[in-house]
Image (cartoon, rainbow, N blue to C red):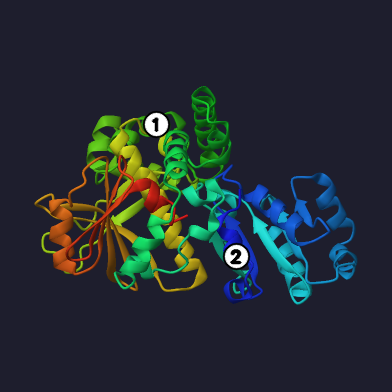
Amino acid sequence: MERIHSKYLFRQDVNWDKMIFLSGPRQIGKTTFIKNHIEKIQQANLYYNWDDPFVFQNYTRNPHFLKSVISLQNSKPLIAFDEIHKHKNWKNILKGLYDIHHHEAQFIITGSARLDFFRQSGDSLVGRYFLFRMFPLGLSESMGQMENIVEDDLYFSGKATSRFLSHLKEMNRKENIETFELLLRFSGFPEPFLKSSQRFSNKWRNDYKSLLISEDLRDMTQINDIKGVEQLMLLLPERIASPLSINSVQEDLHVTHKTVSRWIEGLKKIYLIFSIMPWSHNIRKALKKETKIYFFDWTHITDKGAKFENMLAVSLMRLVYFWNEVGYANYELRYIRNTQKKEVDFLIVKDNQPYTLIEAKLGQTKPSKAGIYFQKLLNIPFFQIVTDYNDIEMYPNQTYIIGAPLFFSIIG
């Protein structure tokens, strides 16, 4: 399966010859992606896994080992280093290799949460790399229909309505539905998705969660109460799709507010969960502080509505990162909720201005009252994405009802 990153990651106008740091959750497909890309574009396999003692031994014996490798290439080669951040002096190693060879080779550095964590300490690599992130599979990626993905934000601005609708109508609706349902059931992590077995998915998810909490969380934070974090993980699925009350969680766990906040931040560091903030600018009586929490693997959630909203959150976050990484503008994913409990699940913000409203629904094919309210207030498009629906309907005031399989097919 081709990933969305193949469309832009190696373009010179995106990476500008800097090192590419590719991070994201464990087992998301980073290594497979880069190995496949190297095999596709060049004859020599210049992928180096620094977990292999032979690779580090080679470097120790000859720190200039890349010179002979690069000299044999007909064009500027792509050199991949995986798991190099596990070595004590990895930043100095990279700094030296990049400074010597960046005019004659391109570098990509892959790793999971630890790469993200360790790169933040010290500044020896400042100005030498751009960071990119890989998310779980999207519908177009899993179907091998990368040409369907929107590469700019015009469809979401209300300025290309007719082109947007005609593009959606061209989608393969039957195949979209089948693949969408598999993603919703088994997640966008490649292995459980490809196996499509409920028993395998259950075992994989439990082992994956245990691995992250017992190894990554312990190594990357000073959190020692692993049992407490596991109890927190049992509480979070039922709190998806609502603003998270730390006070409520701390009462259930009998720990302090500070402890729960620290545990939440730890789970975000290891890519088990992520959060989105509320948007309150120019919204009377809007919530300002309470975040919403989502899992990278939405199969932790049993409630179908919350699971679908979580899946949509991951897909929109992937889209927002895509737009940011290619440099279109500065995008954020937020939500809106006021004290009257009017809420729209997602708001895409562009350069600190509201841009697009998006709501997740299971079967409601009439625009939500909150969606209509905030659309009129902000004067921006409102998209209501419906799970059990596979058509498109346009309402006045830039309001659209779109079946989830169609919508997901154009956002990754």
Picture quarter containing residue 299? top left
Classify residue 127 as left or right of residue 223: right
Residue type at tag 1: Gly
Q: How far is the residue under mark 2 from the one under mark 1?
A: 39 Å
Classify residue 287 as left or right of residue 20: left
Furthest-top residue in this view: 199
Residue drawn at x 12%, y 52% is: 369
Q: Is residue 108 shown to the viewer in this render?
A: yes
Residue drawn at x 33%, y 36% is: 236
Instruction: Tell me whether the residue at label 2 lies in contact with that at label 1, contact meaning CB atoms closer than 8 angstroms.
Output: no
Query: How many marks overall?
Result: 2
Q: Nearer the viewer, mark 2 or mark 1?
A: 2
Classify residue 283 as left or right of residue 97: left
Callout 2 crowding tier (Cα within 10 Å): few <14, some 14–19, many ≥20: some
Where does label 2 land, which residue?
Answer: 9
Residue 202 image offset from top left, x and y in percent:
49, 26
Classify residue 340 as left or right of residue 243: left
Where does label 1 land, which residue?
Answer: 228
Picture quarter containing residue 388? top left
Of 342 and 115, which appears nearest the observer? 342
| Numbered mark located on residue 6 in the image | none
